[in-house]
Image: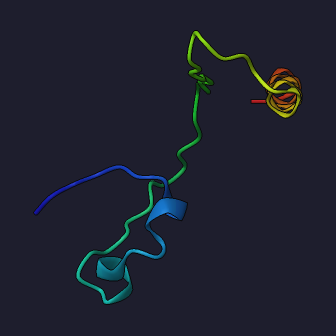
């Protein structure tokens, strides 16, 4: 037996789950208490305009969360 914690979406197309060799057992009444955001970029490159806009959007959504 093994136990792993994964994001459900990442496991939905796994062949072992699809054929029943692995069974997903969801956590009950689990709501995250903290949300972490992070990003990495080479020190020799700068963010593109699209990346900057996406980061602004993420930060806007993050600050407007109601937990």
Q: Residue 18's spot in the image, x, y percent?
A: 38, 85
Q: Is residue 12 left or right of residue 63?
A: left
Q: Residue 55's spot in the image, x, y percent?
A: 80, 26
Is 24 above or below relative to 37? below
| Total labels drawn | 0
Q: Quadrant of residue 41?
A: top right
Residue at the spot 53% in from the left edge and 45% down from the top edge: 30
**Front position in the image: 24 or 14:** 14
**Which residue is situated farthest in the top direction here?**
43
Residue at the spot 84% in from the left edge and 24% down from the top edge: 52
**Front position in the image: 4 or 52:** 52
Q: Is residue 66 left or right of residue 20?
A: right
**Which residue is situated farthest in the left direction here?**
1
Residue at the spot 75% in from the left edge and 21% down from the top edge: 47
Give the quarter of the figure containing the N terminus: bottom left
Colour mapping used in the image = rainbow
Is 58 above or below relative to 6? above
Is 13 above or below relative to 44? below
Q: Residue 16's spot in the image, x, y percent?
A: 29, 79
Give the quarter of the figure containing the C terminus: top right
Residue at the spot 31% in from the left edge and 75% down from the top edge: 23
Q: Residue 61's spot in the image, x, y percent?
A: 85, 31
């Amino acid at each position: 037996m093994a136990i792993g914690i994964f994001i459900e979406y990442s496991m939905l197309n796994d062949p072992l789950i699809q054929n029943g060799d692995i069974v997903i057992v969801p956590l009950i009444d689990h709501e995250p208490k903290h949300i972490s955001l992070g990003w990495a970029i080479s020190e020799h490159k700068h963010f593109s305009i699209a990346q900057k806009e996406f980061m602004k959007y993420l930060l806007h959504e993050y600050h407007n969360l109601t937990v």
